[in-house]
């Protein structure tokens, strides 16, 4: 189970093409900050019976401008995406990654504004 954030802004793409070095540095910081924030929010939203699910949620930066928040617990897909059964009783799913993205929306928007100003300032 993983979740990703993509920033699709024409101005950002144009600036990235014109000023690749300043853009790469700013995007790297953006990726790190947003990834860590979503990781923290997902850990807050994940149900904690034993705490194992929360410990298994991690942010992995795959490149300078990309990263993934992923749960390595083998049962996380049942907790997150579909009703699961425990002691023959149907339990409600807990979409912790989706809720984490919702909680981090305002933070992501603020970071997008910061990155745009950082790129334009470093030109």
Image (spheres, rainbow, N blue to C red):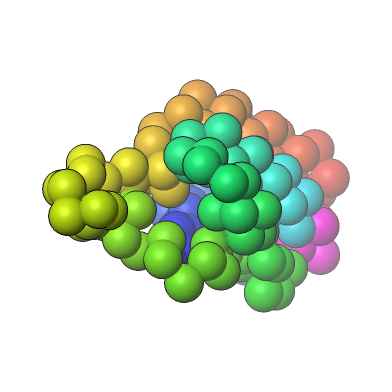
Q: Is residue 69 above or below residue 98?
A: below
Q: Residue furthest front?
A: 87
Q: Could you tell me which residue is drawn at 69 percent across and 46 percent down?
A: 36
Q: Could you tell me which residue is drawn at 70 percent across and 74 percent down?
A: 63
How many labels were placed on the picture?
Answer: 0
Determine whether, in the image, residue 85 is placed left or right of residue 12: left
- Note whether residue 22 is visible: yes
Residue range corresponding to the magenta coloring: 21-25
Residue 119, given in percent of the width and then of the height, sits at 73, 46
Residue 99 image-quadrant placement: top left
Residue 21, given in percent of the width and then of the height, sits at 81, 65
| Nearer the observer, 97 or 22 | 97
> Within the magenta stretch, is there residue 36?
no
Q: Could you tell me which residue is drawn at 22 percent across and 44 percent down?
A: 91
Residue 38 image-quadrant placement: top right
Q: Main secondary structure of the magenta part?
A: helix
Determine whether, in the image, residue 25 is placed left or right of residue 100: right
| Nearer the observer, 56 or 98 | 56
- Note whether residue 116 is visible: no
Q: Could you tell me which residue is drawn at 66 percent across and 53 percent down?
A: 55
Determine whether, in the image, residue 76 is placed left or right of residue 114: left
Residue 105, given in percent of the width and then of the height, sits at 46, 31
| Nearer the observer, 83 or 104 | 83
Residue 10, given in percent of the width and then of the height, sits at 44, 53
User: Which quarter of the image is occupied by the N terminus?
Assistant: bottom left
């Amino acid at each position: 189970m993983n979740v990703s954030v993509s920033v699709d802004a024409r101005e950002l793409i144009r600036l990235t093409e014109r000023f690749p070095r300043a853009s790469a540095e700013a995007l790297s910081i953006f990726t790190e900050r947003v990834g860590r924030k979503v990781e923290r929010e997902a850990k807050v939203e994940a149900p904690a019976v034993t705490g194992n699910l929360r410990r298994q949620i991690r942010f992995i930066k795959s490149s300078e401008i990309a990263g993934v928040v992923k749960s390595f617990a083998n049962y996380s897909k049942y907790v997150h995406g579909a009703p699961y059964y425990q002691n023959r009783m149907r339990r409600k799913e807990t979409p912790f990654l989706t809720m984490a993205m919702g909680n981090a929306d305002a933070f992501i928007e603020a970071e997008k504004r910061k990155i745009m100003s950082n790129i334009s300032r470093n030109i």
